[in-house]
Amino acid sequence: MPYTDTYGEHGWYTGQVDAASGTPHGIGMMNYSNGDFYEGEWRDGVSITPSKTREEPMLGGGFSSPR
């Protein structure tokens, strides 16, 4: 589904969603329009996996850019 994260970045989210709000909630993946992606856990539309945030990428997984 199309989604804009809390940083204002647009992309396509695939994964679990909250039935009431329709926001990412649970395990999912966000493919950003700039080619980046994030995979991990979401709560109320916010990525919460501490080791896989947009600011601190985890080597070997999590948020990254294709090269």
Image (tube, rainbow, N blue to C red):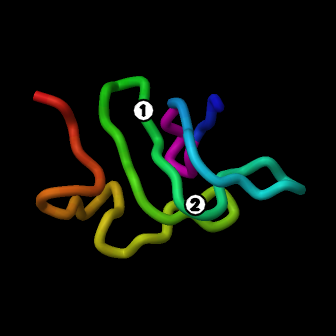
Q: Tally the numbered discs.
A: 2
Please give the name of the residue rendered at 60% of the width and 64% of the height, measured from the top-left corner.
26
The circle drawn on residue 46 is: 2
**How far across and down, in percent of the image, does residue 20 sit?**
89, 56
Query: In this view of the protein, which residue sits in the foreground, 7 or 66?
Result: 66
The CA distance from mark 1 to mark 2 is 14 Å
Magenta region's main secondary structure?
A: loop
Name which quarter of the figure residue 3 lies in.
Answer: top right
In the image: residue 8, left or right of residue 40: right
Tell me if 54 is positioned left or right of 2 in this view: left
SS class of the residue under badge 1?
strand
| In the depicted structure, whether residue 29 falls above or below residue 1 | below
Q: Position of residue 23 (x, y in %)?
A: 72, 51
Q: Quadrant of the C terminus?
A: top left
- First to last magenta residue range: 5-10
Q: Amino acid at mark 2?
A: Val
Amino acid at circle 1: Tyr
Residue 40 drawn at (x, y percent):
43, 60
Q: Earlier in the sequence, mark 1 or mark 2?
A: 1
- Residue 9 belongs to the span the image colors magenta: yes
Compared with 66, 29 (above or below) is: below
Image-based side of 61 in relation to 45, left or right: left
Which of 50/39 is in front? 39
Q: Residues within 10 Å of mark 2 (few under 14, many from 20)?
A: some
Q: Which mark is residue 32?
A: 1
Residue 24 screen position, x and y as percent = 65, 53
Are the two marked residues, 1 and 2, in contact with CB atoms closer than 8 angstroms? no
The residue positioned 59% from the left and 38% from the top of the image is: 4
Judge left or right: residue 35 versus residue 42.
left
Q: Residue furthest right?
A: 20
Image point (22%, 56%), residue name? 61
